[in-house]
Image: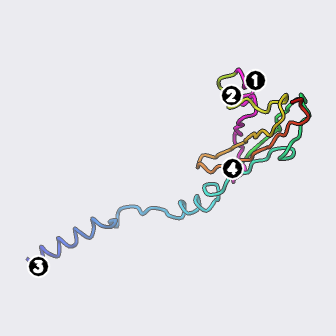
């Protein structure tokens, strides 16, 4: 009876932990991946030019160049919203159904916001908003 109780305890103990013949997991490799910074750091987004642009009435709006990299330096896609031609197909946002917003109206006074976003495979996101001021249009 005592022997069978000890065997039951031994079997229960082996069910809770690895047996001597089972390989143990290498936690060093997992730690190295998490310590690299790519998973926890935000991407770096660079938009050329100033964050506030002033255009005279009917002056052409030119979308600033933008680029992004993840925390490890790998290039990322930059998404543009309310630029007037977000998918860069040459069709303006006012008539292109797959564009996100018409972009700044250079014939109407006002402040327009254009947003740039980039995210990595770990869903770390970064963004920047450019303000476009259109001035001196007849009211």
Q: Which residues are magenta?
A: 71-95
Q: Secondary structure at mark 1?
A: loop
Q: Which residue is mark 4?
A: 126
Residue 6 x, y percent position in the rendering? 17, 76
Q: Which residue is mark 3?
A: 2
- Judged from this view, the residue extending furthest toward the front is 139
Circle 2 residues within 10 Å: few <14, some 14–19, many ≥20: many
Mark 1 highlights which residue? 92
Mark 1 residue crowding within 10 angstroms, few (<14) / some (14–19) / many (20+): some
- Residue sitting at 84 percent across and 34 percent down? 109
Are the residues tagged 2 and 1 within 8 Å (C-beta)? yes
Give yes or no for residue 125 being in the magenta stretch.
no
Sequence-wise, the earlier of marks 2 and 4 is: 2
Q: Residue at x 11, y 79 (%)?
A: 2
Q: Quadrant of residue 101?
A: top right
Whether the residues at callouts 3 and 2 have beta carbons within 8 Å, the answer is no
Viewer-nearest of discs 3 and 2 = 2
Label 1, label 4: how many angstroms apart (C-alpha)? 26 Å
User: Alpha carbon of mark 3 to alpha carbon of mark 4: how far?
Assistant: 65 Å
Q: Which residue is mark 2?
A: 99
Give the total of numbered labels. Answer: 4
């Amino acid at each position: 009876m005592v022997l069978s109780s000890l065997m039951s305890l031994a079997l229960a103990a082996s069910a809770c932990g690895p047996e001597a013949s089972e390989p143990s997991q290498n936690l060093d490799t997992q730690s190295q991946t998490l310590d690299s910074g790519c998973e926890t750091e935000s991407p770096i987004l660079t938009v050329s030019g100033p964050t506030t642009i002033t255009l005279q009435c009917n002056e052409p709006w030119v979308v600033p160049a933008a680029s992004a990299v993840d925390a490890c330096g790998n290039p990322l896609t930059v998404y543009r919203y309310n630029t007037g031609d977000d998918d860069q197909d040459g069709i303006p946002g006012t008539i292109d159904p797959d564009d996100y917003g018409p972009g700044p109206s250079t014939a109407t006074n006002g402040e327009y916001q254009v947003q740039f976003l980039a995210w990595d495979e770990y869903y770390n996101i970064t963004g920047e908003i450019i303000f476009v001021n259109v001035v001196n249009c007849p009211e």
